[in-house]
Amino acid sequence: MAFSDAVVAIAITVLILPLTDINLTDVKTQSVQEIYGRYGPQILGFAISWIVIIIFWMRHHRLFGLVGHIDSGLIWLNVAWLFGIAVFPFPADLVGQIGDGGSLDRFTASLYAGDLLFISVAGMLMSRHVGSHPELQNERGRSSSRYFRTTRAYFATAVFLVVLLAAQWLGMNALYFIWTLFLMEPICRMLDRKFYPADDQAGSSSR
């Protein structure tokens, strides 16, 4: 777990490096509007990428808080997840640099969304793996199956798949669909109440 946290921390740190290219002279001599017009894609790309990695890390951290034992399957799935996290700063940097509106934009957006899709699928498979192997779960994990629902993982995976497909036509504009992740929690809670009503009632009564 400590190794995974370290990889995520390094990836988040590397995300900021492209912003060090901002010319300080421009900051002193130009208006905020002019600076954003020149460096806006880099700043926005960093903000979106940082938030997305934090969301991934929080779900990863929550999952491993339910794990009592680790098997080889979980290790390899975690390695795959970490690979996606380690690669992510590269397409994130490209997103801030490219803006020709052509095929290069479509390639960059596809690479960015493709890596997010890979990370999301790896995380979903980890959750399913732990959920289907009670011997890997700690006491808290075994207390309720609601901890291993994959509603949110499916939602995030669907969002990234839509972004990947849309990038073939919309290029960088397809990345705006990522903001729908902020709707994930209320939508998934509604779906959980619909598809897991008995489990929700059991969880409420136990509290």
Image: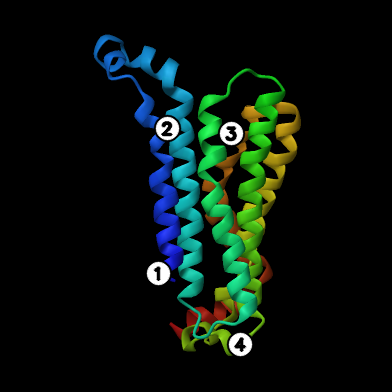
**Amino acid identity at mark 4:** Pro
Q: Cβ–Cβ below 8 Å for labels 2 and 1?
A: no
Most extreme residue toward the top is: 29
Q: Nearer the viewer, mark 3 or mark 1?
A: 1
Query: How many residues crowd mark 3 within 10 Å: few (<14), some (14–19), many (20+)?
Result: few
* Disc number placed over residue 134 in the picture, else none: 4
Label 2, label 3: how far apart the Cα atoms are? 20 Å
On the picture, is 201 further left or further right than 61? Answer: right
Within 10 Å of the Cα at label 2, are there few (<14), some (14-19), or many (20+) other Cα atoms?
A: some
Residue 203 position within the rendered picture, expressed as x and y whole percent measured from the top left: 51, 80
Q: Are marks 2 and 3 in contact (CB under 8 Å)?
A: no
Any part of residue 50 in sight: yes
User: What amino acid type should be assigned to the residue bearing mark 2?
Assistant: Pro
The percent coordinates of residue 146 (x first, y second) are: 57, 76
Q: Which residue is mark 1?
A: 2
Q: Earlier in the sequence, mark 4 or mark 3?
A: 4
Q: CA distance from mark 4 to mark 3?
A: 39 Å
Q: Nearer the viewer, mark 2 or mark 3?
A: 2
